[in-house]
Image: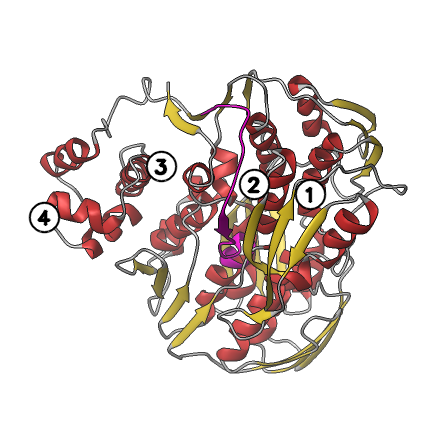
Amino acid sequence: MSTTSPASIGRLIRDARKQRGLTQAELAGLLNTSQGAIGRIELGNQNLSLDTINRIAEALESPLIVPSTERGALNFRIQGQTQLAGSIETRSSKNAAVGLLCATLLNRGRTILRGIAHIEEVARLSEVLTSIGVKLEWSPEGRDLTIERPAELNLDGLDADAARRTRSVLMFLGPLSHEYDHFLLPYAGGCALGARTIEPHLQALRHFGVDVLATEGSYHCTVDHDRPSNRHIVLTERGDTVTENALMAAALAPGTTVIRNASPNYMVQDVCFFLQQCGVEIEGIGTTTLTIHGVESIDKEICYCISEDPIESMSLITAAIVTGSELTITRCPVEFLEIEFSVLGESMGLSFDQTDEYTSHNGRTRLVDVTIHPSSMHAPQDKIHPMPFPGLNIDNLPLFALIAACADGQTMIHDWVYETRTVHLLSLSQLGASVQLLDPHRLVVNGPTTWHGREMVSPPALRPAVCLLLAMMAADTPSVLRDVYMINRGYEDLPRRLNALGANIEPFRD
């Protein structure tokens, strides 16, 4: 994709606006235009003249268009010795957002996703959807996204560059299998976490007549629409995206589909709740057995509120722990954090309070507000390891490596899922942590740690990159974290939000 495409210019404008601390409405006022126009520009849905670009650049005090050879990666300059205070709200779920964006392809009516995050992963999928003819429009305040698909998708126009930068494009397989006898999808990208086979997806989709051959950088998909009316699927991997793909394939497959060993995780539940609004009957939500009664078609006006992100909640909790701060994190989806709270409190000595439960805007997800108190923490007696829900979330495990470096004693972190993510966590040693890699899956962390600032390059994995950022906030001297694209994949406007609590993080480009 060209670096001067409307979508790329829109992202530059959005980043520059946020760096200046302006809302869309405030920028609209400076330009004497509407907030809706700014939303369309930032999404890349409006072609801009050079004069308009220059006017926006002048208002933002930022050169938006520079030669690609001169435009460096986005970096963060972090002042250390951070003390956070106040309250911060958990934003909506990244992983739910991308699954729901894929699921909107099932609906021939208009879909509104409320509270969707402005993150790079959403931007990549938005670029892919726009390239195949889907109309996307942000609300004036920039929090809701309206999606309207055409009668016929233009798969020949698919933005392969954007698709290859996100693993989420795999979840197009289920929806597209209802419309085509043959189609191609580019290889999926995402975080560098080791070998990640798509075989579980292929095994599940074969029950719906989908055969996939991976050659020449693409998935070549062939669909046999003569399939049985009842399907019994046992997933060989209790994966989130494979369960979502099977759900989306089952939604428009008349008859009954039973999925065993299904993931009951938060993003899967969001897709289930959305499909229920679409008229698909689903039993067993929140369990490992899902029964889906498919329908012939979906053509409805749907408005769905995305649930809150438990990984963001845990990231903010970690920010409070590593900086020794008292901080309140609101709207934490407690159902998906109960094991984490138990490990932190009962096994490691963290002092925290939580409110009574209340319900998310989707009417289903249980929330609490949590206040973290500065604590003298100690290493747990047992190793810390992830498990499928309701166990400790695999995406929260890197955060526990950082927390372990703040606790007194030795902690073993066992990441049995990914081959290389523990390797990325070795970077914490460059900031002062005592970290020893036993093998590609096991890490020993000795704490407590006196953090030291330095200049580093962000690792190619989202959660380890955030761990470095949070550790740098606690360092005794300033730090620079370079090439932070991975952080922006999963966190919306994180520097500004942390700065509002007392941090000093300056985004800049070379």
Label 1 – label 3 distance at C-alpha: 26 Å
Circle 4: element type: loop
Callout 1, which amino acid? Arg
Q: Which residue range is magenta in the image?
A: 77-98
Q: Which mark is residue 32?
A: 4
Instruction: Examine the structure image and report whether residue 107 is included in the region drawn in magenta.
Output: no
Along the line of sight, the residue nearer the viewer: 52 or 78:
78
Left or right of 215, for residue 375: right
Look at the picture and state if 217 lies above or below 221.
above
Q: Which residue, given by chain and number where applicable, does mark 2 sit on? A: 190
Q: Check the picture and name the quadrant holding the N terminus.
A: top left
* Circle nearer the N terminus (1, 4): 4
* Circle nearer the N terminus (2, 3): 3
Between circles 1 and 4, the one closer to the viewer is: 4
* Circle nearer the N terminus (2, 1): 2
What residue is rendered at 39% in x and 73% in y? 108
